[in-house]
Amino acid sequence: MKINMLNVMIVSGFIFSTSSAYAANCLSGCPTGVNNGKTITRPIYTLKNNRSTKFADWVAYHVTPNTISGPSRKRKWAADPDLSSSNTLEPDDYRDAHAVIGTDRGHQVPLSAFSNTSNWSMTNYLSNITPQASNLNQGPWAKLETAIRDYVSQGNDVYVVTGPLYESYFASLPQADESHTIPSGYFKVVAEQSNNRIYTSAFIMYQDAGLRDNFCTSEVTIDEIESRAGIDIMPNLSSSVANSVEASTGGLSRELGCY
């Protein structure tokens, strides 16, 4: 991966960006690739909307002990106010989805990761939602999100990038009045910076996942996610660091409860 040496600093042999591309929601730069929509940066996440699929190609966020463990919050769905109605879905588009195709409104950035912030309601914008199979949403996907919060609650903070894969046909929303493409699967990359080093674990799960599936068995390399999703997860990593971090698994497996 190429980087502009005028906009980086070197810390203990690791290269980090100091450019405006280094958003507070991203570690070593926000993802790049899939130029088919609008990038929106909010206090609790940055997302890249796709005007063709009507869903985000990726969403990046930073979870800390101060953002979690807030009071119970309502899931009041809303169209994204910063997107044209032709480029995103509205609440009515999800009518009958659970009954007909067995999906929930699945958060890419979970509300529970930011329930202790004043911006929690932004997680309910439909740009941050996809139709996710109920067994996946309530099973291994939810367990991974819980594992992340459990680790953060111990005094740690992590950066997460999550998004969809479009590798096969899954279904269509029965009441949607706009063209859209529902993902066939999802990825989630969890990263932590500690002592000038970056540790990561990455996962891919599919819409046909079972409710009792173990998310630990879905761990893959970041390289695999980047190849399949067509994006660069941490574009400002130096080549030497990327070759090490992105080609291996297990960097945060134990921390997330995988043994």
Image (cartoon, rainbow, N blue to C red):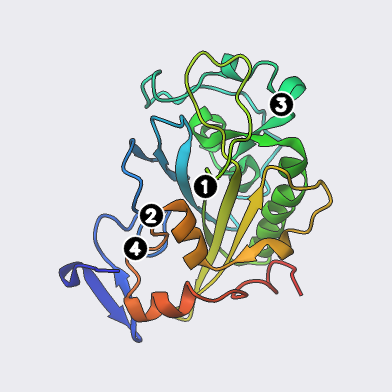
Considering only order in the chain, which callout, 1 or 4, is on the residue closer to the N terminus?
Answer: 1
Considering only order in the chain, which callout, 2 or 1, is on the residue closer to the N terminus?
Answer: 2
Relative to residue 113, is residue 21 drawn left or right?
left
Considering only order in the chain, which callout, 3 or 4, is on the residue closer to the N terminus?
Answer: 3
Considering only order in the chain, which callout, 3 or 2, is on the residue closer to the N terminus?
Answer: 2
Q: CA distance from mark 2 to mark 3?
A: 31 Å
Q: Which residue is mark 1?
A: 163
Q: Where does the N terminus fall, quadrant-wise?
A: bottom left
Q: CA distance from mark 1 to mark 3?
A: 20 Å
Q: Which residue is mark 2?
A: 31
Residue displayed at 38% across by 59% down: 232
Q: Residue furthest front?
A: 168
Residue 153 drawn above or below residue 113: below
> Dot 4: what SS?
loop
Relative to residue 69, is residue 161 drawn left or right?
left
Q: CA distance from mark 4 to mark 1?
A: 16 Å
